[in-house]
Image (cartoon, grey):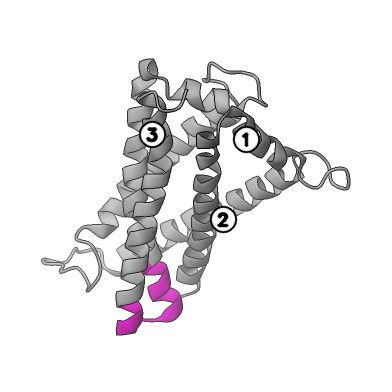
Amino acid sequence: MGLKIIMAVSGIALVGFIVAHMAGNLHVFEGPERMNEYAEGLRTFGEPLLPRESLLWAMRLGLIAAAAAHIASSVALTRRASRARPVKYASRKAARGEAAHAAATMRWGAIVIAAFVVWHLLDLTFRAVNPVKDVPDAYGAVVATFAPERWPVTVFYLAALVALGFHLRHGIWSAVQTIAGPSAVWRRRWRAAALVTAVTVVAGFAAVPLAVSFGLVS
């Protein structure tokens, strides 16, 4: 039960970051000046009392800790479940509110998301694979990475968002099941909340690459 709680709490922390990151991305629709001001504000938050990028490093370390706890608890739970029942069920009916093949979806979705995170860091954080090397130009980097001629990057981004949506939908529902218990009222409310959150996050993130690809943002 402790591992399930760790997985649920770390997952909720990651969801909070994802929602905040999505909201920050939408500054791109306000133009280059506002987007770059937002990005610079994250780097200079707390100055001069705190060193430059203190907030970003606190977020990075927190995310690493949350992701490590989430992955480690997931692997441990999967291994324990496998040892407890080495023979698969002949028939497995999804629990009420649980999507069919949810466990398999969570596994392959996690792999896609992990691969995307690595690419995303190389592209928009470290700029190793981004045409724009000027770190303060966050707007230019976003526009460059989703330029029409780089459509494979956009397709990969959208595919990762689909995986993220499935992961969020089932993960939020499962986390609430763990923390709040199997109440029928909680099931209905949080099943709907999980779906709304997943759709909102996917739509919010997808809006940026699609807008750049179709020339609405340039």
Of the pair 90 and 23, the residue shown nearer to us: 23
Q: Which mark is residue 13?
A: none
Whole-Å distance between the Cαs marked 1 and 2? 30 Å
Q: Which residue is mark 2?
A: 66
Residue 167 in sight here: no
SS class, disc 2? helix
Q: Answer above or below: position of 150 versus 116.
A: above
Q: Which residue is mark 1?
A: 34
Q: Earlier in the sequence, mark 1 or mark 2?
A: 1
Q: Quadrant of residue 90?
A: bottom left
Q: Position of residue 208 (x, y in %)?
A: 43, 35
Residue 16 in sight here: yes
Q: Is residue 10 left or right of residue 98?
A: right
Q: Is residue 209 left or right of residue 13?
A: left
Magenta segment main secondary structure: helix
Q: Are marks 1 and 2 in contact (CB under 8 Å)?
A: no
Q: Which residue is mark 3?
A: 157
Q: Position of residue 73 (x, y in %)?
A: 47, 61
SS class, disc 1? helix
Q: Earlier in the sequence, mark 1 or mark 3?
A: 1
Numbered range of the magenta stretch: 173-187
Of the pair 107 and 75, the residue shown nearer to us: 107
Q: Is residue 45 left or right of residue 104?
A: right
Which residue type does callout 3 highlight?
Tyr
